[in-house]
Amino acid sequence: MNIDSTGWLQLPQADRSHREAVIAVRHVVSPNFNPRPESTSVRLIVLHNISLPPAQFGGGYIEQFFQNRLDASIHPYFQTIHSLKVSAHLLILRSGEIIQLVSFNDRAWHAGRSSYLGVPECNDYSIGIELEGTDDQPFTDTQYVAVNTAIIAIQRVYPQTRQHLAGHSDIAPGRKTDPGPYLDWQRIRQTLADYWQKN
């Protein structure tokens, strides 16, 4: 898996190992982004979870939400969020499919009020990855494969992110709880460490 010069993930046809590991990479453009501040380097990856409606999976509602196309009449919860303008760079579905919504070159609106190592406005210098899930359910094996594959691709292009991987709850404590206690950080960090030890 590669990132092209415009900041979008690409899955080369010849790359069988990655093609087998990741079901698909799809681009679904969100309007909710803006340029990063000038001379800002990408140095942080933030993991989140999301499910729409809460604790329900599938249906395509997360994509619709990030594209400002969520129909508020479908579910009572949607009436409370349909006017919000938010996004993430990546969404990883339960199936392991990766959906990119915002170029890594741009500033997605995923973190809100946030601070990392004393530096505020994490959206300015971070990449946001949403995992379809909840705080109280395990993530799928295919999601772990997909998120690690995506993180490795990001770390190759943005090497500062190799040292900086956090959860939304880490950068917005007291305000956010995701990705929650069921995310196996050790599993992710060990996979990344093994990759970089060999590469």
Image (cartoon, rainbow, N blue to C red):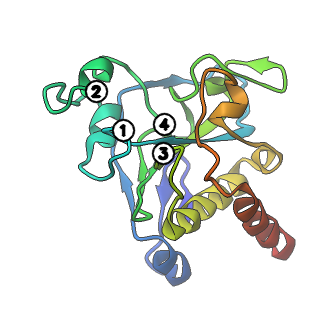
Task: Give the farthest residue toward the left.
Answer: 73
Q: Which mark is residue 54?
A: 1
- Please tell me how crowded label 3 is: few (under 14), some (14-19), or many (20+) other residues with Cα within 10 Å: many
Residue 138: x and y in percent read 54, 58
Kind of residue indicated by mark 3? Thr
Q: Which mark is residue 77?
A: 2
Give me the residue at 39% from left, 66% from top.
24
Q: Quadrant of residue 39?
A: top right
Kind of residue indicated by mark 4? Ala
- Please tell me how crowded label 4 is: few (under 14), some (14-19), or many (20+) other residues with Cα within 10 Å: many
Kind of residue indicated by mark 2? Tyr
Give me the residue at 76% from left, 71% from top.
195
Q: Which residue is mark 3?
A: 134
Front residue of this view, candidates 29 and 142: 142
Front residue of this view, candidates 188 and 182: 182
Task: Say which of marks 4 and 2 sits in front.
Answer: 2
Residue 123: x and y in percent read 61, 26
Q: Disc 1 on helix, strand or loop?
A: loop
Q: Quadrant of residue 79?
A: top left
Specify which label sits upstream in the sequence, 1 or 4: 1
Is 74 left or right of 26, judged from the image as shown?
Answer: left
